[in-house]
Amino acid sequence: MKRRNTDNEEPELLLGEDGVISDGEKSDLSDSEESQYSGLEDSGSDSSDEEEDGAEPADKVAESKSHHVTAGGDEYEQDSSDEEDIRNTVGNIPMEWYKDFPHIGYDLDGKKIFKPLRTKDQLEEFLDKMENPDYWRTVHDKKTGRDITLTDEQVDLVDRLQRGQFGDVNFDPYQPSVDFFTHETMIHPVTNRPADKRSFIPSLIEKEKVSKLVHAIKMGWIRPRKPRDDTPVYYDLWAQEDPNAILGRHKMHVPAPKLPLPGHEESYNPPPEYLMTEEEKLAWEQQDAEDRKLSFIPKQHSSLRAVPAYSRFIHEKFERCLDLYLCPRQRKMRVNVDPEDLIPKLPKPRDLQPFPTTQSMVYRGHTDLVRCISVSPSGQWIVSGSDDSTLRFWEVCSGRCMKTINLDGAIKSVNWNPNAAQVLVAACVERSVIIVNPGLGDRLLATSTDQHLEAYQEPEEQKQQPVTWEFAEGADYEQGVRLRIHHEKAVKQVSWHGRGDYFAVVLPDNGNSQVLIHQLSRRRSQNPFRKSKGQVQRVQFHPTRPFFFVATQRYIRVYNLLKQELTKKLLANCKWISSIAIHPAGDNLIYGSYDSKLAWFDMDLSTKPYKVLRHHKKALRAVSFHKQYPLFASGSDDGSVIVCHGMVYNDLLQNPLIVPVKVLRGHEITRDLGVLDVVFHPTQPWVFSSGADATVRLFT
């Protein structure tokens, strides 16, 4: 142990490591010895510096350690009684700054303090944690790089500080306070200073202030305060509103609820119709007090003098006082709004003509559900597909069935080729898509269509395709069937491209190949998507741009076919989409859903619906736009077709105008199904609808 030396004490002798008593001569410490003293092993990299500085050799270091004495010199030079022996003088800085250097700081002499040669890895740290019983009280000193084991006194100090107690054990926070000042009058004053002269002479400054205040009171500039009257003031809470009264200044005043005026039943001689019979009296007595219309039984008296005292008088007055006392005196701000102002100002339907209003023709001939219809580009013919496995071609104006084609199963979808130079119809039957040439109209067009199909030559190298193309022969060819495209799963929908060469089909149960695009001229088929996101319900091509719309159950995705990327994702905000239709301009679309919603999307405005219509009571099956007129229609299972006016303006700052104009009825609900498909005439403001009652109807 090292002790402090005073001036009067003799230098103490210390016992060296070899057991020899050495005299109190002071020896200097080398750098390596300081490193060992501070708990750090010398890395040996600074040996050259030690020799230059004149440090002692290594064999004299141990000898100098044993000859440590405290004699002579400054008494604080060898002092180690501080609360911490700070050997590192870098100060309060982040020690991470030294992580890339071999030293960890500088000592009091400005020499480097080197880091330990060996540091513990995670395995040694874990073993030390398991085997060392003092591991929990060991902390790492970042400034010196050594581990310090806390003593019991230091652990107790940390525990007391964590509990919010004082660090000193002997400190008593509740010790009695010392009364430094006393309430007793002492004999000797605190100060015996004589009083000033100014304490006996009136103040001139105060005299001037008082004279000014007196003058202001005389002139009326200052009014003295009136004596305060502490007597309580009472006022009637339910008094009439007088502007001069207290209630007139009460902002939240509520007038007292008035009692209802007495009626004929409260008269002493009421009319006979107000008197109760015995059955009514018995029923009145059995009812609860809250359920009774009258709180008393009307009675008839011969004169007013014969009227007895009212037995419930005090009780009713008490309830009246309770009503006044417990009335919620709160003013509710009510907005007086005219209900007609809440209805949007829409133009009258007669100003939006023309639109279909009446049923003009019914096309009968099918024996089962008519699921799909399509109109030719010229508007002269209409084709219908039914569950009775027949494809029927009708003349629009006369209603005559021009041709019937028998197929292998129920027809789920049919679509007429929009190219007027070809007479082709695509129909979905079970797992096949059938291309039909009906041979109606101009014979030259029908012949040129067949020649176009027969001019195809198979390539030398056949590429593997997901479908099989088959050319029709025999009886199928005589009926008008030209091509059969066989798929692996059932086909739900077919949709033509605007130019009439490509068409897309939907196979809901085909995994990642739910959508296929076929090219008629080259007999090629391809899957545009590697992975299907959701169950596909409907697909459709953009009328003018290379965009492709894919509708799943809750989303509508718009893909760019040239860039092969997703352009936009529309949030349908419905449970299940049933059908979609694209506006002829291409910037707006509508969809129908099975939860009775029809929504309009303005794709330039937002990815959410611009307007949602809930005019139908049951599920929507089909929606359609007119190609020339600002009209769109929707068909539902409630047996109605609703025609709406949908005007899209060229001004981008003006929102579309949507006005329902007509509800068309005529289809009979069969098997809880109503209208299954809706399509407009290409040139006239007419609408066709097919229903579960095996009919096709024309509304003009």
Image (cartoon, rainbow, N blue to C red):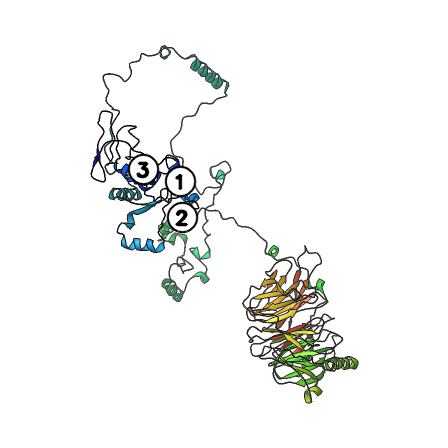
Left or right, residue 536 beside residue 332 = right
Tag 3 near tag 1, CB within 8 Å:
no
User: Which label's residue is closer to the chain start, 1 or 2?
Assistant: 1
Q: Position of residue 519 (x, y in %)?
A: 68, 75
Residue corresponding to mark 1: 48
Residue 647 location, quadrant: bottom right
Quarter holding the C terminus is bottom right
Answer whether residue 694 is visible to the viewer in this image.
no
For image coordinates 30% across by 30% down, the residue present is 76
Q: Give the residue type at disc 3.
A: Asp
Q: Earlier in the sequence, mark 3 or mark 2?
A: 3
User: What residue is shown with label 3?
Assistant: 85
Is label 3 or label 2 in front? 3
Q: Looking at the image, is mark 1 or mark 2 nearer the viewer?
A: 1
* Placement of 682 over or under 113, stated as above or below: below
Residue 430, by quadrant, is bottom right
Q: Secondary structure at mark 1?
A: helix
The quarter of the displayed image where residue 587 is located = bottom right
Q: Residues within 10 Å of mark 3 (few under 14, many from 20)?
A: few
* Of marks 3 and 1, the one in the foreground: 1
Q: CA distance from mark 3 to mark 1?
A: 28 Å
Residue 409 in sight from this viewpoint: yes
Image quarter in which the N terminus is found = top left
Query: Mark 2 sits on what residue?
Result: 326
What amino acid type is highlighted by mark number 2? Leu
